[in-house]
Amino acid sequence: MLFSHGDRIVFAGDSVTDMGSEHPVGEGLFNNLGHGYVRMVENLLIAAYPDMTVRVTNSGIGGNTSRDLLQRFERDVISLKPDWISICIGINDVWRQFDLPVSKDTHVYPDEYEANMEKMITASKAAAKGVFILTPYYMEPLKADPMRARMDEYVEICRRLAEKYDCIFVDFQAMFDRVFAHRHSCSIAWDRVHPNEMGATIMAREFLSHCGFEFHREA
Amino acid sequence: MLFSHGDRIVFAGDSVTDMGSEHPVGEGLFNNLGHGYVRMVENLLIAAYPDMTVRVTNSGIGGNTSRDLLQRFERDVISLKPDWISICIGINDVWRQFDLPVSKDTHVYPDEYEANMEKMITASKAAAKGVFILTPYYMEPLKADPMRARMDEYVEICRRLAEKYDCIFVDFQAMFDRVFAHRHSCSIAWDRVHPNEMGATIMAREFLSHCGFEFHREA
Amino acid sequence: MLFSHGDRIVFAGDSVTDMGSEHPVGEGLFNNLGHGYVRMVENLLIAAYPDMTVRVTNSGIGGNTSRDLLQRFERDVISLKPDWISICIGINDVWRQFDLPVSKDTHVYPDEYEANMEKMITASKAAAKGVFILTPYYMEPLKADPMRARMDEYVEICRRLAEKYDCIFVDFQAMFDRVFAHRHSCSIAWDRVHPNEMGATIMAREFLSHCGFEFHREA
Amino acid sequence: MLFSHGDRIVFAGDSVTDMGSEHPVGEGLFNNLGHGYVRMVENLLIAAYPDMTVRVTNSGIGGNTSRDLLQRFERDVISLKPDWISICIGINDVWRQFDLPVSKDTHVYPDEYEANMEKMITASKAAAKGVFILTPYYMEPLKADPMRARMDEYVEICRRLAEKYDCIFVDFQAMFDRVFAHRHSCSIAWDRVHPNEMGATIMAREFLSHCGFEFHREA
Amino acid sequence: MLFSHGDRIVFAGDSVTDMGSEHPVGEGLFNNLGHGYVRMVENLLIAAYPDMTVRVTNSGIGGNTSRDLLQRFERDVISLKPDWISICIGINDVWRQFDLPVSKDTHVYPDEYEANMEKMITASKAAAKGVFILTPYYMEPLKADPMRARMDEYVEICRRLAEKYDCIFVDFQAMFDRVFAHRHSCSIAWDRVHPNEMGATIMAREFLSHCGFEFHREA
Amino acid sequence: MLFSHGDRIVFAGDSVTDMGSEHPVGEGLFNNLGHGYVRMVENLLIAAYPDMTVRVTNSGIGGNTSRDLLQRFERDVISLKPDWISICIGINDVWRQFDLPVSKDTHVYPDEYEANMEKMITASKAAAKGVFILTPYYMEPLKADPMRARMDEYVEICRRLAEKYDCIFVDFQAMFDRVFAHRHSCSIAWDRVHPNEMGATIMAREFLSHCGFEFHREA
Amino acid sequence: MLFSHGDRIVFAGDSVTDMGSEHPVGEGLFNNLGHGYVRMVENLLIAAYPDMTVRVTNSGIGGNTSRDLLQRFERDVISLKPDWISICIGINDVWRQFDLPVSKDTHVYPDEYEANMEKMITASKAAAKGVFILTPYYMEPLKADPMRARMDEYVEICRRLAEKYDCIFVDFQAMFDRVFAHRHSCSIAWDRVHPNEMGATIMAREFLSHCGFEFHREA
Amino acid sequence: MLFSHGDRIVFAGDSVTDMGSEHPVGEGLFNNLGHGYVRMVENLLIAAYPDMTVRVTNSGIGGNTSRDLLQRFERDVISLKPDWISICIGINDVWRQFDLPVSKDTHVYPDEYEANMEKMITASKAAAKGVFILTPYYMEPLKADPMRARMDEYVEICRRLAEKYDCIFVDFQAMFDRVFAHRHSCSIAWDRVHPNEMGATIMAREFLSHCGFEFHREA
């Protein structure tokens, strides 16, 4: 597997990463890790690799855009000296353009998003063994939806930067498209953004599929 | 205007009609009418027609399908001796097919829906001066979405029955399509079903546009 | 209509404006705008003009007299760079004279009220395209009531200043008199000051009748 | 004083009598007597007559009209075998005509009110040493107010019946008129019906002034 | 009566004065005056003298000893420029000696009590038209009880200082002794210190009996 | 020790026995036994006799008089087939005579008390190996207090019946007199009835001193 | 995989199965399935098999022993017509023997346990395609612990019956032993019985390893 | 007995000492002492020695390791000028090594523990008449358990230091071993650390057995 005994991985992000975790960063038992995909990743790591300790830290804060995350990136991610860094940001950059169209100061447009991401990625590459880029997403499979169309631009930025800086690229948007070929998005999230426990498990599975994770291995 | 001084109108429906109203039926000050489109209809009637009293009764109950509403229709609608009856049902008939696909006993398919509607409409026509059919809807403007496509079948049933029985037809689905040409649905409802206060006002305005309502009239 | 696409309007006032809005100023979805006439104004704007965005900001704080509002007027109104400013203040200036007659330091008498208003109006005229003066009111139609009689002096000051400075004058007191020719005030407010949702709709309708608002227009 | 050691007095009425008392009837320490005029009457009796025990029972229930009180009069008043009975009812008979004009089934008009009162008074006269009629009231001193004008009809019925059946007549409406010559009603009640502690004391004082009560007597 | 129209009276004390009032000082409607004897004094003043305004201020804070009150006396009493000052302190000075015998730093012994009182009385005499000394008390009529015996020493200090400085002396301890000749203390207070509403009325009546108060006067 | 391995003891009583235990009867871990002397008895039994199991059942219900306890004695005590029965009742029989003097139907006078006790004792003697009579008490050491004087009559009845029927007699009243020679009752109970944890421990110690209990024994 | 599209599986058990699920049985979104291993099983099924629907029903109720489950087995399991039945019961049968040793009527000893299990298994075999026996467990790896030793007897009964009736045998006790070779039980459960989310995932993984489940399969 | 009239004893520790006490230190009635062994010690002292006052202070704070306690030892223990000091610390030093193995910065290993303890003991010896060392413990009687084995190292350090500095040594670990020969630990604590009231009594009894405490003495 990708992670070694004793490695530390920090998950940076917004409410989808946060999901009720401790602020500014949380780890350990109970809700300190929240109840989203980060919690599920640790659950599955411990279930299949009880003989290995990987320190999982949740550095997600609800409502964050890439602008907010950049501002606290040194304090809440880099200074923790992680071996691995995961970044999943951008949903709010797009969402505010659609649910609060009049409040333009809360919007983060593609150019700024790309610049914010690039700064965080270069800082991460310098600090850690490996960097994961988890794409933002909108749980809407129809690409004609204007918010989905907008989100695709941000996903594309992620793909480009991941390639440029040799990051591990986890495409949550594409993954949800595959799921929604079979199930309607309303069975995974009320608002097409915040996954329920099933959605969190789908995301954790996708993440772990990039880590050489073996579900049925013997400890 | 359509309504006369002293008329009573009963709004039957599901959670979209209910929106926190008193059970089984509510009327009067405060939350007894809930805080959805029914509350807004009464607000606007009183604002523009303070010299006229129209008794507005909320007979919506959250989670109801047409099957549930039919079962309580005599008790909660007909027996109140309304002058006007409004029926807005069907969202849950469709929704359960998508958010709880495994629980088939909670689904109401088109044939049963049509039969349920027809029974309520004929009972209403015999009891009241006029009957409104308010369509169910899904706040998804893309008709390729499977739940929207399914909903369109139910809307079509409403249209056909309204015509057959000479009811006043209020097409919420078409109305939302017009709105979403300009704004994204996420600014009106988190889950594409339950409108916030803005959405409730949009719905009340649509309803009143079929009633000869004059917003700026002098009392 | 008076407002153009992209305009911002700030509503300054006391608890009648506030009605549970975010402090010091609120805007956006949900309760950030409170549930009074400001919320209703935005609801109706969006219902009839979904193709136009007007940024509505609630700058009301419960319990404020004109003395309190003046003190925070630069921070909570002018500095927001609004295109339109609405001022609705004075109810508490009068009320404290009647419900707390012994606590004279909480009273604001007509001379001070006029001076406070004049300062806020001149600041507003210099900053915005247009200024609305919404009169304070007491939901008591009998002019012999001493608090109503007192309130009429403040309404008169508003009328005089609105004329002097060419503001849009919205006479809530006169409007309520027209309503109470048909309905008793106790059906609109328990305490003759804080309107329920019906009263808030009556106020929003009055406000919008000064804005060239068309309820039934096609978007 | 009117009451003898060991006498029991039952106060029947609506929310003004109830004020949070135990249901259906309450007595004893704490809130069992509510915190309205009944509580104040007992407080003052004990303060001035600590050497005498008078059993005070609160039989008020919020929202009651004379129709409701009549229905429970045998159970909640007569069957308690009181020495003295006090009846204070009618506010809701009138109020519903003004705050819920559309819900006519909740209104109790003068003829029915008089019939209800007469039944309760004759039952009381047969059962107790003495009967108090406490008038309903509206804390509005201006007689031109339509609800006040309506209330005066009910007060007049009380006066007539009290005389006919030789009851002790306590005219709360006239008493409040005297108070509001000096203070505004908003300092006594938010809604012109439910008194605060000051109003409750004013009412208790009026009641006791018909009982030969001596405030400064030595026990 | 002792008080003139427009006079202000400040009641300083501990939890018996406080009884839930606003901190550091409270006045006006509702619970700002607490629900103890201060609330009752204002209630009775308004009931009998609606034509006169006396500003009543509650400056009691629960748990205060004379040491604590002295420390805040300038801020919470003198600086309010009262016409009349009432001081009721000392219960906690004594109580802590009995319920927390091991925590000697919380005890205030007679010598310190007398010094504290003398400082507050001389400051009050210099600032106000008149000063009331309300004795501390223990609702235990048997003088052999050690806490009652101790309290009698503090009452005696009050009596001596009231005479020396020509204050109005209100002997709550003697008053309760008279009441307990007829009723057991457990019907007035659970803990022999904090009166219920009946006890608060007994105390207010005693206070007002030193003020030329006429309960039945015509306004 | 008196109790054998496997014995069951049921404690019947009022709020002093109950102290928050499960109703109608409670046992086991946590609050099922309440937090009064019954809890303390079990705590001490387990601390000193971990090698022995004694089943302790709390059958106390707050507010009970001997009349109430008699009514449920078969169901809540006898039918549990206890080896030992403890009865501690009578405080409310007396208390109501002093805190609710007007409500005579709540009082239980000595003759009825004695009759009630005798019925419960004879039923207990027939059913169990041994019966404890725990006296009611009032935490007032001065016998001149009228409620204490009254309580002494009930204590005397307990003593007489315990002797007549050869019960184990636990005199809580005498025990508290010994304690209050050294400490004031206000450090043990706010209301002279309900002990805090210290008081509960004093009572448990007294109970166990009649059982051959050895605190320091080796298990 | 073992399950086919459209299959229904009912999980019967105690609090470990229940974990906050709806009563008597729960299914669907949110907490209706609780948040224990049943929730995790559904999460993982949907994550890896989004193209297949398996109806998962939680029929666990906290505190149940095998005696309690047997009593409701027809109503809560068999009558649901499941294709698959899972039984996980026995922890409370053992636990009560150790945490409530005095309350013997709450204990279920091995003979009764075996009889209860056998009845449920035969009923299940007659009704479903397949039956899972999930062993009770105590998260104590040291077999010398008396409660663990006792639990091993019950696990052994499960093994024997699973073999006799050809059920799928899931040995949670053995699985936890393997985990605790690497991690201390206190990181999985506070009380050695109720797993946190990590423990629930370990259990779900074990369950699924008997079902031909493929974690990384493509839908 | 060891303690003299007027002595003060301060109990320093973690959550086992704290158990809900006031922070940073608590004493007096009610929950200020928490509800653990400290509360029980005071209860028993007062029950058996009502004629003697010993000031008991709870200086426990939940979650503290020896590192945390050392940091606040001067402020929360020494500066209170106690006659006796009790130290019970170390459980969290060990526990974090097992329930949060990945978070190594929260672990306190034996060398640091010994150093921390030695500093606190020497400071205590210099300040007080006598010092108690209460061992940390894990309520697991099987010494093969890795956390128990680890705890034994810390207990051994306590024993060595107690001997070296002539402290009174209270071996809670050995005491629990004796108890668990008869009862399972799950009847005393859910998590093998925090005792219920029975466990707190067992601990208080053990503590007092080192103080010459006589349970049945006459005051």
Image (cartoon, coloured by chain):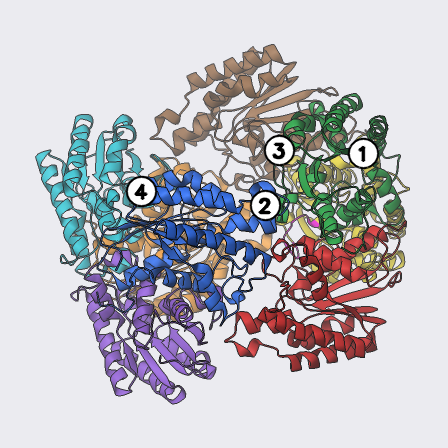
Chain colours: A green, B yellow, C brown, D orange, E cyan, F purple, G red, H blue
Residue at image coords 83%, 78%: G126
Which three-letter amino acid code belongs to the residue tagged 1? Val
Residue at image coords 27%, 49%: E201
Specify few, some or many for label 1: CA neighbours under 10 Å numbering under 14, 14-19, or 20 or more: many
Mostly what secondary structure, the magenta segment? Answer: loop
Q: Helix, strand, or loop for circle 3? A: helix
Q: Helix, strand, or loop for circle 1? A: helix
Rounded to the nearest angstrom, the CA distance separating label 1 from label 2 is 29 Å
Which three-letter amino acid code belongs to the residue tagged 2? Phe
Q: Name the chain letter of the residue that bears numbered label 3.
A: C
Q: Is residue E62 visible?
A: no
Which three-letter amino acid code belongs to the residue tagged 4? Ala
Q: Helix, strand, or loop for circle 4? A: helix
Residue H97, horizontal then vertical, whole percent: 58, 49
Look at mark 2 in the image and give the residue it sits on. B30
Q: Which residues are magenta?
A: B18-25
Look at mark 4 in the image and give the residue it sits on. H126
Front in this rendered view, residue F213 or C115: F213
Front in this rendered view, residue D125 or B13: B13
Inspect the magenta stretch and tell me whether residue B21 lies in it: yes
> Does residue H92 appear left or right of residue E119 in this picture?
right
Q: Nearer the viewer, mark 4 or mark 1?
A: 4
Check the image and report above or below for B200 versus B57. above
Q: Name the chain letter of the residue that bears numbered label 4.
A: H
The quadrant in which the N terminus of chain E is found is: top left
Check the image and report above or below for G48 versus C171. below
